[in-house]
Amino acid sequence: MTNEQQLAQAADMLAAYTKAEAAVLSGKSYSIAGRDVTRENLAEIRAGRQEWELKYKRLSTGRTGPRVRRALINDM
């Protein structure tokens, strides 16, 4: 799968999770990936949305791993 295809998939999944979260927050049930979700699944929906947000961000910026920062301590 190319980077463009992965980015499109991540955008689609992010949109689906965002739509599901909005529907559940408004008191409706929602179906995503063949599963019916309700207000009780809100934490699961949010976790999925956050996962796809992270994947989308990494794919769109070209980063594949966690960000590492290094600091040099100069105590002279």
Image (cartoon, rainbow, N blue to C red):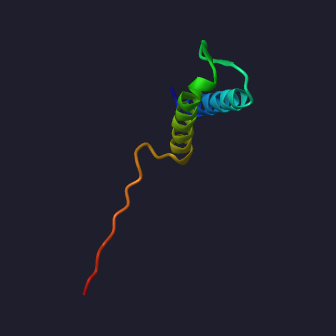
In the drawing, does residue 3 fall left or right of residue 30?
Answer: left
Image x and y of residue 55, in percent: 51, 38
Query: Is 9 situated above or below 68?
Result: above
Determine the image quadrant of residue 76.
bottom left
* Between 43 and 1, the one nearer to me in the picture: 43
- 28 or 34: which is nearer to us? 28
Of all residues shown, which one is farthest toward the left?
Answer: 76
User: Along the line of sight, which residue is nearer the eye, 65 or 22?
Assistant: 22
Q: Is residue 72 above or below residue 11?
A: below
Rendered location of residue 57, percent (x, y) = 55, 44
| Label total for image | 0
Q: Is residue 16 left or right of residue 65?
A: right
Q: Residue at x 40, y 44 (%)?
A: 65
| Residue for point 67% across, 27% down | 20
The extreme bottom residue here reads 76
Who is closer to the viewer here, 40 or 5? 40
Q: Position of residue 59 (x, y in %)?
A: 53, 40
The residue positioned farthest toward the top in the image shown: 34
Examine the image and state in which quarter residue 7 appears. top right
Residue lying at 55% horizontally and 32% vertically, measured from the top left: 43
Where does the image place residue 30, in percent across and percent down from the top left?
68, 19
Relative vertical location of residue 29 with respect to residue 47 in this rendering, above or below? above
Q: Is residue 29 left or right of residue 45?
A: right
Does residue 58 appear left or right of residue 70 in this picture? right
